[in-house]
Structures are given as C-alpha cells and as structure tokens.
C-alpha cells in the first residue's frame, strides 16, 4: 500500500510540474507566435515548414530511441549513459554534415533558393540539442520535471523575445529561424548548468548493443512517424503555394497545442511510472484506463472548443490575412483530439517491452494513411485535412488491438470509457457553432464561446462524469482542492 501511495504522489507531482513546463512553455510560445503571425506572412511560415521533415528525421537518428531505453532500463549503469551521450553527439555531427551538403538539393526540390542557407542555419539548433539529450532523459527517469519546467520556460522567453525583436527589425523568415536556435541554445546551457552528470569513462559495446536492440525498433517507428506526419507538408509545399503550407502548418500548430502538449505531459510521467509496474497486468490495466479517461476528459473539450471557436480565434489573434487557416484549424482539431489516445496505447507496448509490435503497428497505419491521403490530394487541401479524421479513427482501431491482447483493454472497452466524454463535448461544440452563426462580432463572440463552453462542459461533467472530475480535482494543489471540495466530493480519492 505504501508503495502505491508513493507511486501516486510521485505521479501527481510529476504531472503538475510536467504540465507547468509543457503548457507554460507552449503558452509563452503561442503568445509569441501570435505576435509573429501579425508581423510575418503565411509565406514566411511556409518556407520554414518546407525543410522541417529533414530536420525531424535527423532528430530521430540523433536520439535513435536511446533516451527511451535509458528511462526504461531498471539497472541503469554509467556505461549506458556515457555510451548514449557519445552516440548522440556523433549522430548530431553526422546529421548536420549531411543536411549542410544536401541543402542545395532540398532547395531545388521545393524551387525555393533561400532554403539552401535557411536549412544550414536551422540545423544548428538540432546539433546543439544533441549535446543535452542524456541530461533530459535522466531528469525524466527521475520524474524531475520541476527543473525541466524552469529551463524550458526560460528558453521559450529568450527565444521568443529574440524572434519578435528580429521580426520588428524586418528580418522576415529569419526571425523564426533564430528564435528556435536561441531557445535551443539557452535550453542546452541550462541543462548542463543544472545537471550533476558529466561524461566520463569509455564507450561500451555491451551497453550499445542493449540500447540499440531496444532503440533501433523505436528509431524505425520514429522515422515512419516523422515521414508520415510530414508527408502532408511535403505534398502541400510541392504542389501548392507557400501561403497554403503556411496556413496548414499554423492551423496544425494551434490544433496541436492542447492535444500534443497534454499527451507529452502524460507520456513523460506515465511512461516511467507505468514501467515500474510493467509486470503487474491487473494494476497496469487499472492505471492505464484511468490515464485514458483523464486524457480524454481534458483534451476532448479543449479540442472541440477550439474547433467551434476557430473563426473568431483566427480573426482576433492572427488577423484577416490568415482567413484560409480557419477551416483547416477546425478540421485539424478533430483528428488531433484522438492523438493522446493513440499515444497512450502505443506507450503501453513500450512499457511491456514490445517495441517490435510498436513498429508493426506503425507500418500498417502509415501505409493506410498514405493511401487515404493519395485519394484526397486531387480534391484540394481542405479534403486532404479532412481525410486525417478518417485516418485517425481507423488508426485507433488498429492501435487498440494489441492493448486488448496484452492487458485485456481493447477497442470496445476504451470506447466505452471515453464515449460519455465525447458526447458531452459534441453537445458543447454544437451549441457554440450555433451561437457563432448568429454572432457576427468576433471580438464579442470569442469570450462568449469560452464562457458557454466551460459552463456546458463543467455542468455536464458534474452530472455525468463525477469520478473523472474528482480525479482531476484531486491532482490540484491542496489549497485549490479545498476550495473545490464543496463542488465535488474528493473524500473517496483522498482515501486511495
């Protein structure tokens, strides 16, 4: 029982600081993104997005799944850490050299000469990041997100201020490039400054074989996922205008803020925590379902709320020049809504050490997704984005197959768990959409949308989702939890 209480407290504390880091960092980034979107054009964002697939692939090779292997390994040795550190740096230097030499070819592919220099400079951020991959993995293994939160917030603020300053000075697209580089530099410096670990010892072939045996499958999965995630920007950048790609990446960016960041918060805490109970299937299944409902309870209303308020949101924060972003944002919210459900299912395979199944599922889903996208391409960018919703639902059915096999929590159990949350979210979405149809003043519509959405969802949750609401409140600091005790009874959770 003491172990369970310790695990629960560690999870709650980790979730709080991880959430503060991710949402604090992304909140600051979103604020700076709004300023930059008003200063820059969709074309500028499109240019930055064009080479992103190559940078993302390089990051996959630099990590190669070694970070996850360090987190998961119960008997971690210093040789494992040192070997990972050396590997990350070697891979970073090699990847930067390849990108530097191939940048003219990438610029020719997109017919955008500026990409030659843009990619050479942008890749410096990736190279700098390779020097601190180990430090972040060690902090994650220790579930120390307080330190990471402070570091990330500082890096985001410095990078954002530099980006806005350069944009105001007329640097255009380069403001986005240097914003990312300076943020990564500050992050790397602070991770080294606050970390007690320093590289010593020699490369260990034994450690490398262990790390590669696990990480290579994760690397293959990461490559597949990166190619798939970036295939839309590749196709849009090649077949459509840079402004269209800018609208797409901006819509995807804001749709990803609530979904991917909450998923990141949950994964960074639940992966090391669930790894400690990986051999207790009953306990693993119970905690897994609780995490699933928790993520849906928070993400679904946020995504549906953003979708329904997409029109006033874009006009108020980004400006009229981003009109083409609205419908893409509204659609992207619906396929991003299921992102945490996908991620949690795949996390379970890693917890159980089945990276082979992880890779198998990734191959199946990606082939299916590409087929659906190819069918949608002739019908334009809106249909392409809408096809992502179909792909997401089909992928969910595939992802849950092995979850059902491993811990007996398959597709239908998971759908029963999240169905009430989805239905309440749809009620909220429908009311806001109807309200916006009649409310023409976008500056008045946006705050009204927020009030209406919160009121409907909280009232429905109090009536139909009491257990989930209690679980959320129980994770808040004691001072806040005490003030809400009259709203929802948390006594049962305090006893767990």
Image (cartoon, grey):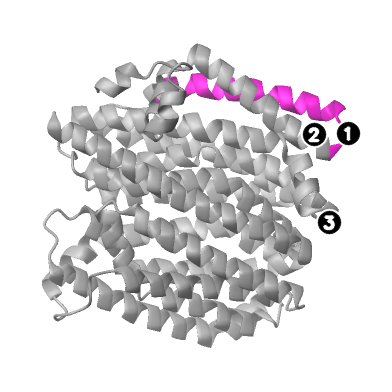
Q: Nearer the viewer, mark 2 or mark 3?
A: 2
Q: Say whether disc 1 or disc 3 marks the residue closer to the N-terminus.
A: 3
**Which residue is at the front of the view, 142 or 393?**
142
- Dividing the picture into quarters, in which one does residue 239 lie? bottom right
- Dividing the picture into quarters, in which one does residue 216 lie? bottom left
Picture coordinates of residue 305, whole percent (x, y): 65, 33
Q: Say whether disc 2 or disc 3 marks the residue closer to the N-terminus.
A: 3
Label 1 close to label 3 by CB (< 8 Å): no
Label 2 close to label 1 by CB (< 8 Å): yes
In the image: residue 492, left or right of residue 294? left
User: Tag 3, which secondary structure?
Assistant: helix
**Which residue is at the front of the view, 97 or 84?**
84
**Which residue is at the front of the view, 4 or 370?**
4
User: Tag 1, which secondary structure?
Assistant: loop
Picture coordinates of residue 59, whole percent (x, y): 43, 69
Q: Is residue 304 visible?
A: yes
- Pointer 3 residue: 321
Residue at x-position 46% and y-position 55%: 225
- Pointer 1 residue: 440
How far apart are the two marked residues, 1 and 3, measured between alpha carbons?
Answer: 18 Å
Q: Find out whether residue 437 is within the magenta segment.
A: yes
Residue bounds of the magenta highlight = 414-442
Residue at x-position 28% and y-position 31%: 287
Q: From the image, which quarter does the C terminus lie in?
A: top left
- Pointer 2 residue: 445
Q: From the image, which quarter does the N terminus lie in?
A: top left
Residue at x-position 67% and y-position 40%: 331
In the picture shown, does residue 49 fall above or below 146?
A: below
């Amino acid at each position: 029982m003491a172990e369970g209480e310790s695990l629960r407290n560690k999870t709650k504390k980790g979730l709080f600081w991880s959430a503060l880091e991710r949402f604090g960092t992304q909140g600051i980034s979103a604020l700076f993104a709004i300023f930059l979107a008003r200063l820059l054009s969709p074309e500028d964002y499109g240019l930055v997005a064009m080479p992103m697939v190559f940078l993302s692939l390089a990051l996959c090779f630099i990590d190669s799944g070694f970070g996850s292997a360090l987190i998961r390994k119960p008997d971690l040795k210093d040789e494992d850490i040192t070997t990972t550190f050396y590997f990350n740096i070697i891979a970073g230097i090699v990847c930067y050299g390849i990108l530097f030499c191939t940048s003219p070819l990438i610029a020719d592919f997109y017919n955008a000469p500026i990409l030659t220099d843009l990619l050479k400079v942008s890749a410096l951020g990736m190279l700098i990041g390779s020097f601190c991959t180990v430090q972040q993995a060690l902090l994650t293994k220790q579930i120390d997100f307080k330190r990471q939160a402070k570091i990330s917030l500082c890096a985001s603020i410095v990078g954002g201020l530099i980006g806005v300053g350069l944009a105001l000075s007329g640097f255009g697209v380069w403001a986005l490039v240097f914003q990312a580089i300076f943020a990564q530099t500050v992050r790397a410096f602070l991770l080294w400054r606050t970390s007690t670990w320093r590289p010593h010892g020699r490369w260990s072939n034994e450690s490398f074989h262990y790390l590669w045996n696990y990480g290579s499958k994760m690397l293959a999965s990461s490559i597949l996922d990166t190619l798939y995630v970036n295939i839309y920007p590749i196709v849009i950048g090649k077949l459509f205008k840079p402004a269209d790609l800018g609208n797409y990446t901006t819509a995807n960016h804001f749709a990803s803020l609530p979904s991917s960041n909450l998923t990141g918060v949950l994964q960074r805490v639940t992966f090391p925590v669930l790894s400690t109970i990986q051999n207790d299937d009953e306990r693993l299944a119970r905690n897994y379902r609780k995490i699933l409902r928790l993520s849906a309870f928070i993400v679904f209303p946020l995504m549906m709320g953003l979708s329904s308020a997409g029109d006033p949101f874009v006009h108020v924060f980004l400006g009229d020049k981003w009109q083409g972003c609205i419908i893409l944002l509204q659609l992207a919210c619906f396929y991003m809504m299921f992102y945490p459900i996908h991620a949690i299912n795949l996390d379970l395979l890693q917890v159980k050490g089945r990276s082979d199944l992880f890779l198998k599922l990734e191959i199946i889903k990606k082939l299916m997704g590409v087929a659906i996208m190819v069918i949608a391409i002739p019908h334009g960018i809106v249909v392409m984005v809408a096809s992502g919703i179909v792909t997401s639902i089909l992928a969910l059915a595939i992802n849950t197959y092995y979850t059902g096999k491993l811990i007996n929590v398959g597709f239908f159990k998971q759908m029963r768990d999240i169905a009430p949350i989805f239905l309440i979210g749809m009620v909220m979405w429908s009311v806001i959409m109807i309200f916006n149809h009649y409310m023409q003043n976008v500056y008045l519509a946006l705050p009204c949308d927020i009030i209406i959405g919160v009121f409907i969802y909280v009232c429905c949750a109090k009536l139909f989702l009491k257990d989930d609401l209690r679980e959320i409140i129980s994770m808040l600091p004691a001072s806040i939890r005490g003030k809400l005790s009259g709203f929802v009874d948390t006594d049962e959770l305090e006893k767990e």
